[in-house]
Image (cartoon, rainbow, N blue to C red):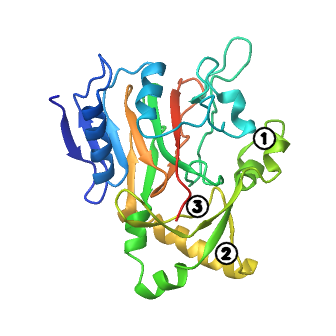
Amino acid sequence: MNYLIKPLTQGFGAEIFNFEMAEGLNENLTQELIETWNKAGGLIVVHNLNLSSKQHISLSKHFGPLFGDPKEDPLQDTVSRYIHPDHPEIYRVSNQVSKDGIPRGRKGAGTYWHSDVSFRERPAQASLLHAKTIPPVGGDTIFADQAAAYDALSDGMKDLLAPLFAWHDFEVAARTQYSKPVVVENDMNGANCARHPLIRTKPETGRKSLFVNPGFTSHIDGLDANESKAILDFLYQHSTQPQFLYRHRWAEKDLLIWDNRSLMHFAVMDYPDNEPRYMERCTVIGERPV
């Protein structure tokens, strides 16, 4: 297929033009896409892609099993109202509300630095987000390369962090990012809490990256609160420096595929309610971090 690949930044990311799925994806094309994704540090933008919900699910399954698939774990109950009514594998992001007052998706999804579903024993691997309707300006998504941030640490800091584990808990975000009636208390019973290494290794490439995020990481295991906060605050400040960032300005039909194992992201909600935004996301279940 005659598609074009260009780098997004000097450090990570690639954008793809003239990629078509009119007749579906064959295995060779899928592997090319995944190889490009890995080589680009886990972030690719496929521009102007006509993608139905069924095609979106089919493409996403090439990356791995999906949250919400009838044979797999669902996302947490608190976001169940935002799941596509016909496709449980799709989580919807939107500021739109139907005529009967039901949200078409989560309005303020991801307006904080985080890695999707990091609070599970098997956190998210890839997220595939497709833009159906976007406002004329605003709604950018910012990505932070946690592999590059790890590489930039001193050897002494790497040695300090290497044996440490941190707890990731959905409650960290739920208590600050969700209104009280929305939060399902069953999500606070430990099913959405997991202990992961601060430094994880991507199995496909062997590259190491930081694996903590302000959205879901509660504390470092075995340290007191002040010690944990000091280290985490340093890592958050370090890993969101401009040289590690890419800010994506969306266009309709953009498909972004990012690797939650080595990237954090932040959704900028700077658009008014009268400018519609609607996106669909599939989330791939990953391996246990090592």
In the displayed structure, 232 sits above or below 134; it is: below
Q: Height in image: 95 above or below 102?
A: below
User: Tag 2: residue type?
Assistant: Lys
Q: CA distance from mark 3 to mark 1?
A: 21 Å
In the drawing, does residue 82 fall left or right of residue 276? right
Task: Characterize the local packing of mark 2: few (<14), some (14-19) or many (20 or more) Cα atoms within 10 angstroms.
Answer: some
Q: Is residue 220 above or below residue 98?
A: below
Of the residues under marks 2 and 3, which one precedes in the sequence? Answer: 3
Q: Say which element carries label 2.
A: helix
Q: Which residue is mark 1?
A: 179
Q: Is residue 65 left or right of residue 48?
A: right
Please say whether residue 275 is visible from this viewpoint: yes
Name the residue rendered at 38%, 75% in the picture.
152
- Location of residue 256 in the rendering, given as x and y in whole percent from the top left corner: 40, 38
Residue 213 is marked as 3
Of residues 270 and 75, the one nearer the viewer is 75
Can you tell which quarter of the image residue 251 is in?
Answer: top left
Earlier in the chain: of badge 2 and badge 1, it is 1
**Label at residue 131:** none
Q: Residues within 10 Å of mark 3 (few under 14, many from 20)?
A: many
According to the picture, the residue beneath numbered tag 2 turns out to be: 229
Residue depicted at 66% across the width and 20% down the height: 97
Residue 252: quarter of image: top left
Q: Is the residue under label 3 in contact with that under label 2 (CB below 8 Å)?
A: no
Circle 1: residue type: Ser
Q: Secondary structure at mark 1?
A: loop
Q: Given contact means CB atoms under 8 Å apart, are the residues at marks 2 and 1 in contact?
A: no
| Residue 107 % position (x, y) | 63, 33
Q: Residue 111: percent from the left, percent from the top?
A: 59, 46
Name the one closer to the observer, 205 or 144: 205
Residue 16 to residue 273: above or below: below
